[in-house]
Image: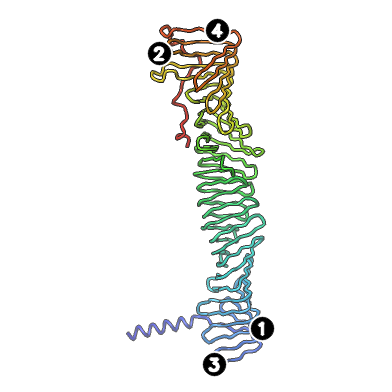
């Protein structure tokens, strides 16, 4: 026990001895006050503790190696200079507490606050109340924060704001590296840029190179667009955002929405392209929504209207019609949907094939379909045995709709019609084949009401029992119901 106490007392004495005392470098007047066991230093006071210098007008230097200073306080520690009106310093903890009109600066920052704690051993400063920091052309402020002088890092907490000539960052927690000029945030954050702004909950911003990465709930609000994704990389110089996984681009009217898993959006030109299962949705009402899926989707805003280009393996779904083609282009200006290269279109019980198909919308519903070159329209007449088809063919066909139903079909050039007939008992009686220069077909209740043959029509009625299977279909007949897009398959 005695050995232990002896060892402990020696250990403590060594610690006490190893602590360097505060050294008085200069004072105009020095007085000792025995009642408080302290030296009173007056006039041009300079003291040193290890590598830190303390300057002031007056000071109490206590025997326990702490000091309290007043007036024109200045601390010089390495490259850091701190000024204030009042100071308390404890040599044992190497903690300096400065109050009133505190200014802290080095070759990277200028910090202003009312209370500052400076740790001379670790070279970092802490402020518990509002502070403003100037770094280059930026101003940073927060209710609480740290400055680590060794690695030139700032840590901010509560009501953090970073202002620069080009943007403003508002958040709750932010780390700023002054050497690299990169800000890291791990809390709800808003970045304001001109008319646009960006929201996220985790990420970094390179203030020097104007680049940023956001990895938690990022949303880019750009003029009349909103861009959502799992993560977002943004290049402010190029005005371009790169989005990854679960992408949504929504316009302000909430009518145009783009989905995908990789996308690039330029906020200046309002152009975007999306890959990895992209889908474009034009939302009107649930039943009038248009969906287009493809391999690569290009979106462009031209004079306040959208142009959507869907490239490769394109499929379209609307409750009135469905379509597929290599490429599909939608122009919001004239509400036209262009099907390009190997197009096919389905509406009601019909399938239409042509070299080129254009669908026109009006008042949120289909208005007409224009088919150009090698047109064939097929309709399954026998839905039980699936072996009889009504067919229309021609060089150009216009299909007009009224109240969501076919109103008329006009066939122009090399017009042909194959139409199966029934008697009053519902029994098949024959196949009517007709051809002429033009044919007009009128509908009533989705059934053929009247057929008009124009310019030298030729017609033949073949009794049902005399129909030859190989001659009951037009040359370009190709019935493909399995290719008809379904809504559930679009996403």
N-terminal of the pair, mark 4 or mark 2, is 2
The residue at which mark 1 appears reads as 44
In the rendered image, residue 178, in percent from the top left (x then y), is placed at 60, 61
Q: Nearer the viewer, mark 1 or mark 3?
A: 3
Q: Nearer the viewer, mark 3 or mark 4?
A: 4
Judge whether 198 appears above or below 90 on screen: above
Figure check: 358 above or below 472:
below
Residue 200 percent across, percent down from the top left: 54, 53
**In this view, the mark in front (4 or 2):** 2
- Residue lying at the far left of the rendered structure: 1
* Image spot of residue 400 (x, y percent): 57, 24
For marks 1 and 4, give the CA distance.
Answer: 119 Å
Q: CA distance from mark 3 to mark 2?
A: 125 Å
Farthest residue toward the bottom? 34
- Residue occupied by mark 4: 458
Q: Is residue 68 left or right of residue 351?
A: right
Secondary structure beneath disc 3? loop
Question: In front here: 371 or 67?
Answer: 371
Residue labelled with disc 2: 427
Q: Is residue 252 above or below residue 184?
A: above
Q: Residue at x 34, y 86 (%)?
A: 2
* Depth check, front residue: 287 or 133: 287
């Amino acid at each position: 026990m005695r050995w232990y106490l002896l060892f402990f007392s020696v250990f403590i004495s060594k610690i006490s001895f190893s602590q360097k005392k505060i050294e008085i470098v200069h004072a105009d007047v020095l007085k000792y006050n025995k009642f408080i066991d302290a030296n009173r230093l007056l006039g041009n006071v300079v003291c040193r503790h290890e590598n830190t210098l303390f300057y002031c007008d007056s000071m109490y230097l206590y025997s326990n190696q702490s000091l309290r200073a007043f007036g024109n306080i200045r601390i010089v520690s390495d490259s850091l200079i701190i000024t204030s009106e009042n100071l308390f310093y404890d040599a044992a903890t190497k903690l300096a507490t400065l109050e009133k009109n505190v200014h802290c600066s080095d070759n990277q920052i200028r910090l202003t606050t009312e209370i500052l704690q400076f740790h001379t051993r670790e070279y970092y400063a802490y402020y518990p109340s509002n502070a403003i920091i100037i770094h280059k052309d930026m101003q940073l402020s927060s209710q609480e924060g740290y400055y680590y002088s060794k690695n030139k890092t700032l840590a901010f907490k509560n009501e953090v704001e970073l202002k620069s000539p080009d943007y403003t960052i508002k958040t709750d927690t932010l780390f700023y590296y002054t050497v690299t000029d990169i800000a890291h945030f791990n809390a709800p954050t808003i970045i304001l840029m001109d008319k646009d702004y960006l929201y996220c909950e985790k990420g970094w911003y390179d203030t020097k190179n104007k680049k940023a990465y956001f990895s938690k709930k990022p949303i880019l609000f750009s003029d009349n667009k909103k861009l959502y994704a799992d993560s977002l990389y943004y290049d402010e110089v190029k005005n371009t955002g790169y989005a990854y996984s679960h992408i949504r681009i929504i316009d302000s009217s909430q009518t145009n929405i783009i989905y995908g898993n990789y996308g690039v959006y330029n906020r200046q030109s309002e152009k975007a392209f999306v890959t990895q299962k992209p889908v474009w949705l034009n939302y009107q009402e649930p039943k009038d929504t248009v969906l287009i899926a493809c391999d690569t989707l290009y979106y462009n805003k031209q004079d306040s209207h959208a142009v959507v280009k869907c490239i490769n393996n394109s499929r379209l779904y609307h409750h009135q019609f469905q379509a597929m083609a290599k490429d599909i282009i939608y122009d919001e200006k004239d509400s036209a949907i262009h099907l390009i290269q190997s197009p096919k279109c389905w509406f009601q019980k019909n399938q239409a094939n042509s070299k080129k198909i254009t669908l026109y919308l009006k008042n949120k519903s289909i208005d007409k379909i224009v088919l150009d070159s090698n047109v064939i329209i097929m309709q399954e007449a026998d839905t039980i045995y699936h072996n009889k088809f009504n067919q229309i063919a021609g060089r150009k066909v216009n299909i007009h709709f009224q109240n969501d139903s076919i109103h008329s079909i006009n066939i122009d050039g090399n017009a042909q019609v194959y139409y199966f007939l029934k008697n009053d008992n519902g029994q098949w009686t024959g196949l009517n084949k007709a051809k002429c220069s033009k044919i007009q077909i009128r509908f009533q209740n989705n059934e053929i009401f009247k057929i008009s043959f124009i310019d030298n029509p030729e017609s033949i009625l073949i009794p049902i029992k005399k129909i030859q299977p190989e001659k009951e279909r037009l040359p370009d007949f190709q019935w493909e119901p399995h290719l008809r897009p379904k809504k559930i398959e679009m996403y």
